[in-house]
Image: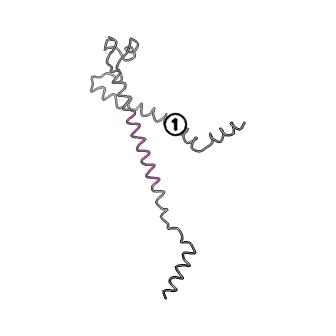
């Protein structure tokens, strides 16, 4: 029973709950970025390269006909799927940039919150008394 109590304490810590929320939001945001790349960015790039779906660009490694779709070519053997890799790499770059910007904004917000702490600490009473004695002796 002690292990269950320990697990409950662990699961209810703020960091664990925050991490769970972050993973869920991150997964949803990843889908948005994936859609942005596949539905908005890659079609114009594909148009520049001849109108094919850029994710279907590959080099056949097993003698497949290069006019097949990537899925059909994979069924017939190994392929070098550089178009799919480029699409996923673009997804990652956009996602990493957005996360970098979010962390940057959070760091700026933390610096602004931390700035008002410039109040000097109060001088201890014994130091104040010693200064008064010093000043009295000088007079």
Q: How is the image coloured?
A: one colour
Q: Main secondary structure of the magenta part?
A: helix
- Estimate the x, y position of residue 48 in percent, counting from the top left: 27, 27
Residue 7 position by quadrant: top right
- The structure residue drawn at horizontal position 29% and vertical position 26%, both measured from the top left corner, is 47
Q: Where's residue 93, x and y in %?
A: 37, 35
Does 99 appear above or below 31? below
First to last magenta residue range: 91-110
- Which residue does the image show at 43% across and 52% down from the upper left? 108
Q: Is 58 above or below relative to 4?
A: above
Residue furthest toward the bottom?
139
- Toward which corner of the image does residue 77 lie, by quadrant? top left
Mark 1 Cα within 10 Å, few/some/many (few <14, many 20+)?
Answer: few
In the image, what residue occupies the spot 49% across and 66% down? 119
Between 102 and 48, the one nearer to me in the picture: 102
Q: How far across and down, in percent of the image, does residue 22 sit?
A: 52, 39
Image check: 13 left or right of 98?
right
Residue 103 lies in magenta, yes or no? yes
**Quadrant that contains the N terminus:** top right
Q: Is residue 2 above or below residue 81?
A: below
| 115 within the magenta span | no
Q: Secondary structure at mark 1?
A: helix
The percent position of residue 90, horizontal first and vertical second, equals 36, 32
Q: Nearer the viewer, residue 115 or 132?
A: 132
Residue under numbered circle 1? 23
């Amino acid at each position: 029973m002690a292990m269950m109590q320990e697990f409950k304490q662990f699961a209810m810590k703020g960091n664990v709950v925050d991490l769970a929320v972050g993973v869920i939001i991150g997964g949803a945001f990843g889908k948005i970025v994936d859609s942005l790349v596949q539905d908005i960015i890659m079609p114009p790039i594909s148009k520049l390269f001849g109108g094919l779906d850029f994710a279907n660009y590959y080099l056949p490694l097993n003698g497949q006909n290069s006019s097949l779709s990537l899925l059909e070519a994979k069924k017939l053997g190994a392929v070098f799927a550089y178009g799919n890799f480029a699409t996923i790499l673009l997804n990652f770059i956009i996602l990493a940039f957005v996360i970098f910007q979010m962390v940057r904004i959070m760091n700026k917000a933390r610096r602004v919150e931390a700035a008002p702490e410039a109040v000097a600490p109060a001088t201890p009473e014994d130091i104040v008394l010693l200064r008064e004695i010093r000043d009295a002796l000088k007079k």
